[in-house]
């Protein structure tokens, strides 16, 4: 079953968000300490009005266990959704001039993070979340879904391309090389 996330899903969803972000999570936290990273994203997952909020997340649940999560939002809202997060990082994590470039664009519903617990990978959960995310975007009136995927992540590249995403352009983000993929709803 796929459903909207709830604040109480934080302990299951936050590790998925952090896993999907990989080294970017440590950059945002200004720390390589897993506990610091987890607490940062848990704090924001449980709040309203930011890019990592439960409000912007759907989860795949089986037998009351979260097995996967997709975090997504209107790309045109990124700067507003990121504002409180960046202010918090400046104050609490000593990232005073930290201003990552926008990774999304106005006019697209942006898939920020998608992750499945390791023991459930390869069972179609990622594909189901992608399809649910596309339906979510369409229901909100979006005609495009966009995302960034690391160039070297061939498994994710193949999953998105099999789901109908097409290469839009190459894009740098926080020092990494990504492909910007688009799905037209």
Image (cartoon, grey):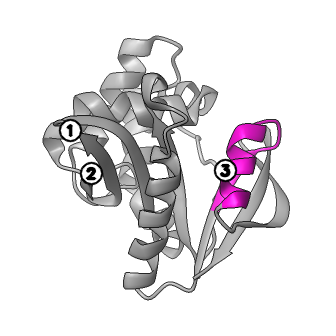
Q: Is residue 150 magenta?
A: yes
- Report the residue marked by disc 2: 54
Instruction: Estimate how packed mark 3 is, as few (under 14), some (14 to 19) or many (20 or more) residues with alpha carbons within 10 Å.
Output: some
- In the image, residue 141 sits, relative to residue 111, either above or below, namely below
Q: Position of residue 48 (x, y in %)?
A: 22, 56
Q: Give whichever of discs 3 and 2 has the lower sequence position.
A: 2
Cα–Cα span, label 1 and label 3? 25 Å
Question: Which of disc 1 and disc 2 is earlier in sequence?
Answer: 1
In percent of the image, x 40 and y 55: which residue is there? Answer: 51
**Which marked residue is nearer to the observer: mark 2 or mark 1?**
1
Q: Are marks 3 and 2 in contact (CB under 8 Å)?
A: no
Q: Which residue is mark 1?
A: 9
State left or right for residue 31 relative to residue 155. Answer: left
- Reply above or below: 46 against 161: above
Does the rendering let one see residue 144? yes
The part of the chain drawn in magenta is: 147-162
Q: Is residue 111 above or below residue 16?
A: below
Quadrant of image for the C terminus: bottom right
Q: Crowding near pointer 2: few (<14 within 10 Å), some, many (20+)?
A: many
Front residue of 87/19: it is 19
Is residue 95 visible to the viewer in this orientation of the structure? Answer: no
Q: Quadrant of residue 132?
A: bottom left
- In this view, the mark in front (1 or 3): 3
Secondary structure under the numbered disc 2 in the rendered image? helix
Vertical comparison of 116 with 51: above or below: above
* Left or right: residue 155 compared with residue 71: right
Q: Residues within 10 Å of mark 1 (few under 14, many from 20)?
A: some
What is the spatial separation of the Cα atoms under label 2 and label 1, in whole angstroms?
8 Å
How far across and down, in percent of the image, does residue 109 sit?
52, 72
| Callout 1 touching callout 3 (CB < 8 Å) | no
Which residue bears the numbered disc 3? Answer: 159
């Amino acid at each position: 079953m796929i459903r909207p996330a709830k604040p109480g899903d934080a302990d299951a969803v936050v590790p998925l968000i952090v896993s999907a972000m990989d080294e970017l999570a440590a950059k945002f936290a200004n720390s390589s300490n897993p506990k610091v990273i987890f607490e940062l994203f848990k704090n924001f997952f449980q709040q309203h009005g930011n890019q990592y909020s439960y409000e912007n997340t759907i989860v795949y649940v089986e037998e009351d266990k979260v097995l996967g999560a997709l975090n997504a939002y209107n790309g045109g809202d990124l700067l507003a959704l990121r504002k409180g997060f960046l202010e918090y990082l400046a104050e609490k994590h000593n990232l005073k001039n930290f201003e990552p470039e926008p990774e999304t664009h106005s006019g697209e519903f942006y898939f920020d993070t998608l992750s499945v617990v390791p023991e459930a990978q390869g069972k179609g959960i990622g594909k189901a979340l992608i399809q649910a995310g596309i339906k979510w975007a369409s229901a909100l009136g979006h005609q495009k879904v966009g995302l960034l995927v690391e160039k070297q992540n061939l498994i994710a590249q193949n999953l998105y391309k099999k789901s109908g995403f097409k290469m839009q352009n190459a894009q740098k983000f926080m020092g990494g090389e990504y492909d910007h993929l688009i799905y037209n709803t």
